[in-house]
């Protein structure tokens, strides 16, 4: 019998807010501590251990301390790079971790005569562990179709940092059908930040979820981090997803239509809730009929939340719309930036009067569209061009 832990998407060093960066690291520490107390035989980390290929000294110091604990407990750690801690030069801090003897990177392959990618195993007793890293923008998906290996061992694990088709649904994202991956018993997946498990008779595909949520929406959807404990014996594979307790998340949605009175309305709603030591997520939605987002006094609202004892607060106004004379603009999170752009546009239009100026605000908006992670360039271009045509009132025939 063997028992191992499967982690992914720790994103150590992620989050701009110090309070959340701290919870992220704390969550990772809790996972490591529970791996040690559970006496697992080994630990798999399926990519994105770090949020970037070059984490800060502070983050390195803290994470090395955790790896030292695991090493002292004599638990081997097997890793692959993810899309975040991968570097095109091939040099990352994962190499430093490995050289220090804290983990083993299991990416190991050769290109055969037909251009196919033959993976070589890292053996843990009679268990074969194969690994293929992530790349920026899902570039690994094409390569994965060429990957193969020998499935001749008692138990085979394949660590992959990529997207399988079952988890994306209809979103236009590069993904691979899980059946197209070479045959393994356990697919230790990473990259998709949600908990997912699929099974066939002899195989199991698992995304354990990130060890801590990585953005506003993940805090809403996941609430906390998680990881997987996997037990293998003659009876088969048993897996359990363990959630990592952390500070409670409170999600407050407020519908507003008046920028002038919104501040008081939001504060009144927040005043009814116990915010003590909570992560307060404030989401504003609706259409502003009077006033602008710039009229909402966010500093005052945040002061109020913190004075009520909240641990940290984040806001999202991406679903808030503003009613203006000729057009409706969707406002991004950078509200003050939007306002500045608007003032500049108005000044420009006054000194350079032209019929075309009416398109400027919406053009700015469309041109700030961002490519979704893993969205194909062609799909993104098409989306961009079609939005531009709509704004410029050009028919589909162009
Ligand atoms: Mn990730």
Image: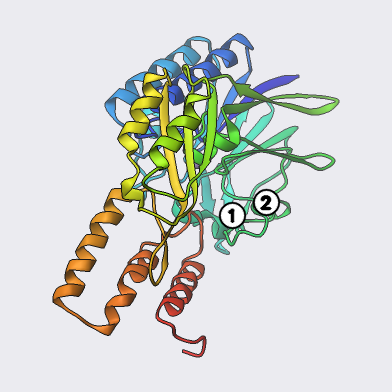
Instruction: Residue 162: give x, y in percent of width and height.
Output: 57, 48
Residue 106, placed above or below residue 358: above
Mark 1 to mark 2: distance in Å?
Answer: 7 Å
Instruction: Residue 331: give x, y in percent of width and height.
Output: 40, 55
How has the structure been colored for display?
Answer: rainbow
First-in-chain label (1 vs 2): 1
Rate crowding at label 2 as few (under 14), some (14 to 19) or many (20 or more) other CA atoms within 10 Å. some
- Which label is found at residue 181? 2
Instruction: Residue 118: give x, y in percent of width and height.
Output: 59, 51
Residue 80, placed above or below residue 308: below
In this view of the protein, can residue 73 be seen by the observer?
Answer: yes
Give the quadrant of the N terminus.
Answer: top right
Residue 349 lies left or right of residue 156; in this view the side is left
Q: Which residue is mark 1?
A: 144
Tell me what residue is drawn at x 36 percent, y 53 percent.
291
Q: Quadrant of residue 232?
A: top right
Q: Quadrant of residue 200?
A: top right
Q: Is mark 2 within 8 Å of ligand 1?
A: no
Disc 1 and disc 2 in contact, CB within 8 angstroms:
yes
């Amino acid at each position: 019998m063997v028992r191992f832990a499967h982690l992914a998407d720790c994103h150590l060093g992620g989050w701009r807010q110090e309070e959340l960066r701290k919870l992220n690291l704390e969550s990772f520490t809790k996972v490591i501590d529970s791996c040690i107390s559970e006496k697992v035989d080994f630990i798999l980390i399926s990519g994105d251990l770090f949020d970037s290929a070059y984490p800060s000294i502070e983050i390195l110091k803290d994470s090395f301390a955790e790896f030292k604990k695991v090493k002292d407990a004599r638990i081997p750690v097997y890793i692959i790079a993810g899309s975040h801690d991968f570097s095109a030069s091939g040099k990352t801090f994962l190499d430093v971790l490995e050289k220090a003897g804290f983990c083993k990177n299991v990416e190991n392959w050769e290109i055969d005569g037909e251009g196919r990618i033959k993976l070589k195993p890292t053996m843990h007793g009679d268990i074969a562990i194969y690994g293929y890293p992530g790349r920026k923008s899902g570039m690994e998906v094409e390569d994965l179709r060429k990957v193969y290996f020998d499935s001749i061992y008692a138990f085979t694990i394949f660590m992959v940092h990529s997207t399988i088709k079952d988890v994306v649904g209809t979103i236009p994202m590069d993904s691979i059908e899980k059946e197209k991956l070479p045959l393994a018993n356990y697919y230790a997946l990473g990259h998709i930040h949600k908990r997912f498990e699929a099974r066939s008779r002899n195989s199991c595909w698992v995304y354990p979820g990130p060890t801590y949520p990585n953005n506003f929406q993940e805090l809403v959807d996941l609430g906390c981090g998680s990881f997987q404990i996997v037990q293998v014996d003659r009876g088969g594979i048993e897996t359990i997803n363990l959630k990592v307790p952390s500070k409670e998340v409170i999600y407050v949605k407020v519908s507003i239509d008046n920028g002038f009175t919104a501040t008081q309305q939001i504060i009144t709603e927040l005043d009814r809730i116990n915010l003590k030591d909570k992560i307060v997520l404030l989401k504003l939605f609706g259409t502003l009929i009077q006033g602008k987002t710039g009229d909402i006094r966010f500093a005052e609202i945040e002061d109020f939340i913190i004075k009520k004892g909240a641990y940290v607060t984040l806001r999202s106004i991406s679903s808030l719309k503003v009613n203006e004379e000729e057009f409706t603009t969707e406002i991004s999170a950078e509200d003050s930036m939007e306002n500045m752009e608007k003032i500049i546009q108005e000044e420009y239009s006054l000194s350079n009067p032209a019929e075309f100026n009416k398109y400027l605000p919406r053009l700015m908006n469309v041109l700030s569209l961002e490519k979704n992670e893993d969205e194909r360039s062609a799909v993104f271009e098409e989306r961009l061009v079609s939005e531009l045509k709509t704004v410029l009132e050009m028919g589909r025939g162009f």
